[in-house]
Image (cartoon, helix red, strand yellow):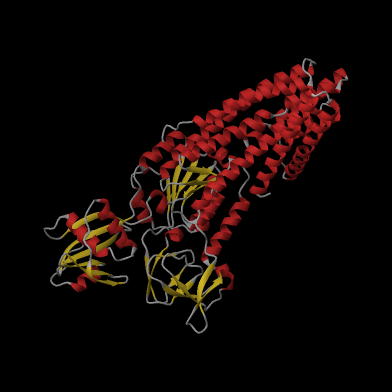
Amino acid sequence: MHVPRRAHLGTALLILAGLGLLLGLILRAGGQPALAGMVWMLGVLPALCALLVEIVQSLRRGELGLDIVAALSMTAGLVFGETLAAAVVAVMYSGGQFLESYAEGRARREMQDLLSRVPRSASRYTHEGETLEEVPLDALVPGDRLLIRRGDVVPADGALASDTAFLDTSALTGESLPQRLTEGAEALSGATNAGEAFDLTVTRPAADSTYAGIVRLVEEAQRSKAPMSRLADQWSFGFLAVTVTLAGLAWALTGDPIRAVAVLVVATPCPLILAVPVALVAGLSRAAQYGVLIKGARPLEAMAHIRTLILDKTGTLTDGRPRITQITPQNDLAEDDILRLAAAADQASKHPVAQAIVTEAQARGLSLPLPRAMEEHPGEGVMARIEGRRVLVGGEDFVASQIEGPVPPRPALDAGAVLVAVAIDGQMAGHLVMADPLREGVGTLLAGLKHQGVERILLATGDRREVAERVTRGLGLDGLRSGLSPDQKVLLVLTEGKSGPVMMVGDGVNDAPALAAADVGVAMGARGAAASAEAADVVLVQDRIDGLAPGLEIARRARAIAVQSVVAGIGLSVLGMIAAALGWLTPVEGAVLQEVIDVAVILNALRALRIKPATP
C-alpha cells in the first residue's frame, strides 16, 4: 500500500469512527438507544474490516501484532451488544493508524524540495548532425551522439567526442576534484559536467550503464534488508496471551460473556496503539527542527539502537568542494595580494577550481577588480589584465610555459591535493594548494557519538587510501576501507551488521546501495545525489554532518519516552483487566477507564516534543 493511499484510508476511518461515536452519543442522549446502537455499529464496521485486512497481511508475513486484541474487543462488543464500547475502541484504533501514516507522509513531503531529478531524457544529435532532439533514456543506443551541457548529469556511459571535458565524479568515485578527460576517454553515467558543454558518443544503453547498475544495487539491497521490529510488536505476544487468558477465565468461571467483553475493551492496547506513535511522531517533528528528516517511525526506532557507524569521505567527512589550504609566495607579494589577483583573473571562468579561488577571496573580504583582455585555455588556465598587470593562473606546466626565467621549485603536496600556479608580469608569483579538507568539528562530533553509545566508527570511501589516511589522521577511527566500489560498500555494511545495527552516512550515487542495505541510511540532502536521498532512511537537510548527534539523541530519548508510556499504560491496563474480570467494571466503564489511561500516557508521550539535545 502506498503511503498516500494509506494516509487517506487512515483519515477516512478516523472520520467515520469519530462521527459514528459522536452521533450515537447524541441519539442516545435524545432517548433513541436502538438507533444509537446501529450508528455505533456502522461506525465500527469500516475500522474493523480494515483491521482484519491488516491482520491477515501481517499473519502472511509471519508477524503477530497487537491489532488482534483490538479486533477481538470490537468484534466481542458488536456480538454481545456493547456497541458503545466497540465504537470507542474503533476511534482509538483508527487514531493510531492515522498518526502513523501522518508521520510517514510528513517526512516524505518535507523531502520533496531536497531531491533533484534523475535524468529522464537526453539531447541527441539527429542523423544529419545539424539539430538536437530530446529523447527518453530508453531510446539511446550505442553510437548515438549526445550533447552534455554544463551542469548536466551524464545519462549513459560513453566516449568523449570533444577535445576536453571536466567531469565531477565525486558522487560515483569519491574524488572531490573534477577530472579532466580528453577525446576518446570513457565518461561514466551519473557524473556531472563541471565544465563547458561537450559531445559524447554512447557506448552502452542507459539500462546497462554505470548509474543504472547502481540503482539495481539499491533495489536489491532494499529487498534483502531485514524488516525492523516495531516497539509495539515486541510487547504483542505476551500482552495478547495475558489478555486472552484473563478474558477466557472470566467467562469460563462466571458464565458471563460481558465480563470477557469488559476485559477485552480494557485490554485494547491503546498505550501501544496511540502512545508509541505519539512519542515517535513527536520525535520526528523534534528532529526535523534540528535539520534531520527521518522517514517514519521505524527508522527512528532503529536509530535508538545503532552501535556501528560507517561514514563516506567526500561530501560527508569533507566538504566535497576544493578549498585553498596553503598559499606559497615566491616573491615579496603578500598571500592576500596573490589570492586577490588570481581570483580577479578567475572571475570569468566557470571551472570548479577557479570558482573555489574566487570564493576564498570573497570570504576573506578582498576586493576583486574586473579582468581585462581575458583569455581562457580550457583545462589549462586563464590569462588576464588586472589593474594593468598581466596575470596567469592555472596548472604548473601551463604557467611555466608562458613565463620567462627560471621556474622555482613547487611546494610539496599531500595526497589528493592540487597545485595552482600564479604568475604576474612574466614572473612566477606563487602557488595555491587546493584540497578537500575535513569539515570543522568532525573530531568533536565523532567523540560525542562515541559518548552516546556508538561503539565502532569506520570510514568507507572509493578514494585512494593515502588520501583517506591524510584526511582522517587523528580522528581515532576504528577502521578505514578505501578504494571501495558500490557493491563492496554494501558488503562492508552487511558484514558489520552481523554484530549489531549499522548506520551508513553518505552523499554520492555510489553510496546509495550501502544506504539502502544499512539498518539506517543517512544522506546529505543539501548537495547530495538524488539516488542517495531516495535510498536513505534519514536526510540531513543542512550541509552539515554534525546533525547526526542531535538526531541520534532525539531518537534514543523519544524511544525511551515511548517505552515509559508503554510500561505505565500496560501496567494500568492489566489492573483494569483484573477489575473487569472480577465484575467491578462494565464494558463501557472499561472503555472510559481506558480513555483516562490513554490521556495519561499520551501526555507523557508528548514530552518528546520538548527534547533538548545536549549537542545542538
In the displayed orientation, state which residue is furthest to the left.
Answer: 332
Could you tell whether 81 is left or right of 272 in the image?
right
Residue 146 position (above or below residue 48): below
Could you tell whether 79 is left or right of 591 in the image?
right
Residue 204 position (above or below residue 12): below
Which residue shows up at 72% across the image and 22% down it?
Answer: 592
From the viewer's side, name the closer residue of 280 and 56. 280
Q: Quadrant of the C terminus?
A: top left
Quadrant housing residue 174: bottom left
Is residue 431 among the parts visible in the rendering? yes
Residue 253 placement (x, y as % from top left): 85, 18
From the viewer's side, name the closer residue of 586 and 176. 586
Is residue 305 among the parts visible in the rendering? no
In the displayed orientation, state which residue is furthest to the right.
Answer: 255
Which residue shows up at 73% across the image and 26% down it?
Answer: 267
Residue 553 position (above or below residue 388): above
Residue 485 placement (x, y as % from top left): 48, 59
Which residue shows up at 49% across the image and 52% down it?
Answer: 114
In the displayed orientation, state which residue is furthest to the front.
Answer: 30
Residue 293 placement (x, y as % from top left): 51, 44
